[in-house]
Amino acid sequence: MITATATESAAVKTLYTQWQETRFYGDDQIYYTASFERDGNRFRVAFAQQREMGMTAAAVLTMKLIQLFRPRYLVMPGIAAGISTQKTDEQFYGDVVVADVVWNYAAGKFVSTDCADIQFGGIGFIPRPTVIRMDPKIRACVEKAVNSSENQCHVRIGPMACGSTVVANREILDKQIHSQFPHTIGLDMESYAVIYAAENAVQPRPYALVIKGVSDYADGEKSDDYQKFAAYTSAEFAKLLYEKYLPLN
C-alpha cells in the first residue's frame, strides 16, 4: 500500500498491531511490513508514505515499492474529494470511492479564450485527458466485496479524476472535470501516477487499485475535519478486499 499523508498512514497502521519497520541499503525511505493469514497461508503486506504530496512523489514511491517487494497488488487508500453530480448518488463523509477509471484531468494546453471551449477569465484550456481503466476481473472482486455482508462501508465504484493541485472551487469541477467525464465521483492528487507507474513497471506488474474515502467536496467549504474518518474507512475496505476477495494464488 502507498499513502500520501500522515493521516492516511495512521489509518493504515490501525489495520495490524505488529508492523515491522523495514529499510533497504541505500534507500532513506521507511517501509512497514505486517502479515495476515488466509486459507491456511500467510501473506505479507507492506506500506510506505510519500515524502510529499502529488503525482511525482507518488510515481517514484510506487516504482520503489514494486521493485523492492514485487507485490501482486498495489493499493492506494486514503482521502479524496467526493464530486458526484448525480442527485440519486449523494455522497457523505466517509463514503468509499473505488476507482474503475483513473484519469488525469490536468493534461492539456492553456491557450487564448478564442481557441477553447473551457475558459477561466482570460485563459482558455484545451483538455487532453489520459485514462487508465480497472481490469474487469478485479472489478468483479470489488463488486463482490461491496455486496458482502462483511462490508461495513458505503462504497461507490466510478471514475476518479487526478490533478496536481488541491481543488476548492466548484467552477473547476464543472468546467474542467465534469465537462469531460460527467460521471466522475472522486478527485485526488496522486491516483493517476500510482496506476500509471504500476501499468508501466517491469514484469511481473501488480494490479493497482485506488480506494479513497470522501473527506470533502472540493468546494469553498473544504476542510480537514473528516480526513481521519475518511482515511479509516478507505483502509478498512482495502483490508477486507485483499484479505477476503482478491485472488492471492
Image (tube, grey):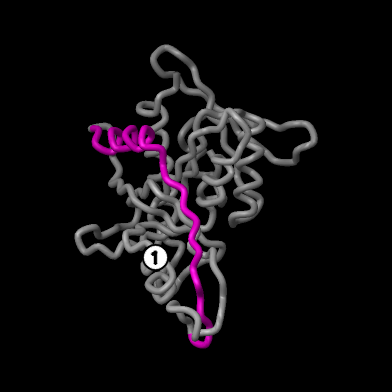
The answer to whether residue 126 is magenta is yes
Is residue 225 shown above or below 41?
below
Residue at 52% of width from left, 36% of height from top? 74
Q: Residue lying farthest front?
A: 115
Residue beneath disc 1: 180
Q: What SS does tag 1 mark?
A: loop
Residue 140 point in image, percent of width and height: 31, 34
Asked if residue 169 lies left or right of residue 13, the reply is left
Residue at 80% of width from left, 36% of height from top? 26
Q: Amino acid at mark 1?
A: Gln
Is residue 158 shown above or below 138?
below
Residue 206 point in image, percent of width and height: 53, 33
Q: Nearer the viewer, residue 239 or 130?
A: 130
Asked if residue 231 lies left or right of residue 148, the reply is right
Q: Quadrant of the C terminus?
A: top left
The answer to whether residue 182 is magenta is no
Q: Residue lying farthest left?
A: 88
Rate crowding at label 1 as few (under 14), some (14 to 19) or many (20 or more) other CA atoms within 10 Å: some
Q: Nearer the viewer, residue 166 or 178?
A: 178
Q: Residue lying farthest top?
A: 40
Asked if residue 136 lies left or right of residue 167, the reply is left
Q: Magenta residues? A: 121-148
Residue at 42% of width from left, 12% of height from top? 40
Is residue 186 shown above or below 194?
below
Residue 157 point in image, percent of width and height: 32, 47
Is residue 210 shown above or below 21?
below
Residue 92 point in image, percent of width and height: 30, 57
Residue at 30% of width from left, 46% of height from top? 155
Q: In the rendered image, which quarter is residue 168 located in?
A: bottom left
